[in-house]
Amino acid sequence: MPKEPHAKPSEIARREKKKAKVEEPAPPPPDKPQQCHFWVARKRRYCSLPAKLTNKFCGEHLNQENGNEKSKSDRRIPCPYDNSHTVFEKDLETHMQLRCNSRPREPEVFHSLNVNCSVPLSAEELEFQKNIYSHKQMHPQPWITRVQLAQLARHELDTLIEKVKNVQVPSIESSILTHDAAESKRQNVKQTKHLDQQSSLLGHMASAGMLDNKEACFIEFGAGKAELSAYVKAAVAEVNGEATYVLVDRKIVRNKVDNALMGLSTKRSTVQRVTIDIKDLDLSKVQALSDENGKRKKIVALSKHLCGSATDITLKCLMNYVESEKAAGNTSPISGIIIALCCHQLCRYEMYPNIPYLDQVGFSKLDFARLCKMSSWAICGQRTQAEQGEEDDHATVAQEAGDADLTTGHYSGLDHNDREKIGYRCKRAIDTGRVRYLEQYGFKVKLVYYVDSATSLENCALIAVPEEK
């Protein structure tokens, strides 16, 4: 087979090995009672759900049974709301009306469409984002794939690179901290990447005074299972339900730690899970932010993984809240913000919070789209299989053919090291606008490398606390 152009031999070998694994025939199913005979190729094992004694397949994979002559009562079809699961055709109407977790619901009181966008979204983007599972299935976003740096004339690409080099970005120190609340778990963890990140983030929160107030409301954006919030609960050492936890995520997740966050004492912590796209979140209307007397609680905002524009709309969401609270006489509603930054290639002009900054440094809407695409140069090409994670999966969404090339055969004419430097420069240019945005609202903001690059190539965090008055 001929080699792919501009690809490193080891990269080609890895892809071929991965492809071979996928195409490898399934082994015979295990000989045990009620074993489902559906081979899950992605996990390289058979489905673990039990089948009826009279069937080869479990209920979820019953549509794999041979023969299309099944009656409506026996036939399973994909759910129209979320095709990652199936339902008996006879039960479809009831499932869609009452049971499906993906069914449309009445908007919550804190829902305000696109309230955290800087510019109105296009009809195309609104339609794409209706599918809350689009990010999970890693569908390439059409407005990102349309931006092809390889198709630019060399002088256009060179002009963009010069613009990036001329942006004044702050110096960033490396400060890798730890916290006992996370370190106590280390001996029980085999893969330490996430623990290293969580421990350092907690260390920086403690250093910035974000863990001093047990009665604060800790809001985790992109919370997932809320593991970081669980470490925060241990770090603040609250056992009598003093703290409040608001967990924001646009998808419904399994194996949550919400119950553990409530605690075991008689008075349990307040935990509110907010299932919403952050772009639509009016934080001032989230019930858990006020105590029983209607008094606002101090907020600490945190996140370990907010991809691209999710960081931008989170900052916008928080500053919209600051504005509404200051108008009501609450001059310092937020005690601190800490966000581990990643996936700048997924940023959107419409969601970027500081468009005046882009105008100031000379980036048009098209320039910004190309800047974001170019930021992927920082993290593509030299990742081993062990280093790959969610950030790297997202990097491939924006990666173009040839970006893994380590030579000057790349369409830019630059070798990998030079492109990597430019990619990081793009990231920091985007982050500088975020820093200046928060400074406008009276925050003292810094960027810090909170873990080393061997732990994660996305190792920069944004930390903000109110300026002392």
Image (cartoon, rainbow, N blue to C red):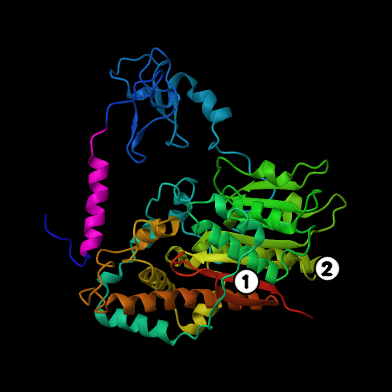
Q: Is residue 140 magenta?
A: no
Q: Which residue is mark 2?
A: 329
Q: Is residue 464 above or below residue 170?
A: above
Q: Quadrant of residue 73?
A: top left
Residue 229 bears which disc, if any? none
Q: Is residue 231 above or below residue 432?
A: above
Q: Nearer the viewer, residue 195 or 443?
A: 195
Residue placed furthest toward the right: 293
Q: Quadrant of residue 433?
A: bottom right
Residue type, mark 1 in image: Ile
Crowding at mark 2 (Cα within 10 Å: few <14, some 14-19, many 20+): few
Mark found first going from the N terminus, 1 or 2: 2
Instruction: Write the start and end of the magenta stretch as one range.
Output: 9-26
Q: Is residue 439 above or below residue 84?
A: below
**Image location of residue 374, percent across then percent down:** 37, 72
**Image location of residue 364, percent across then percent down:** 44, 76
Q: Nearer the viewer, residue 123 or 421?
A: 421
For marks 1 and 2, give the one nearer the viewer: 1
Residue 463 bears which disc, if any? 1
CA gap, disc 1 and disc 2: 25 Å
Query: Residue, x 83% and y 43% (percent of image)?
Result: 267
> Could you tell me if residue 70 is visible in this image?
yes
Q: Secondary structure at mark 2?
A: loop
Residue 331 left/right relative to 38? right
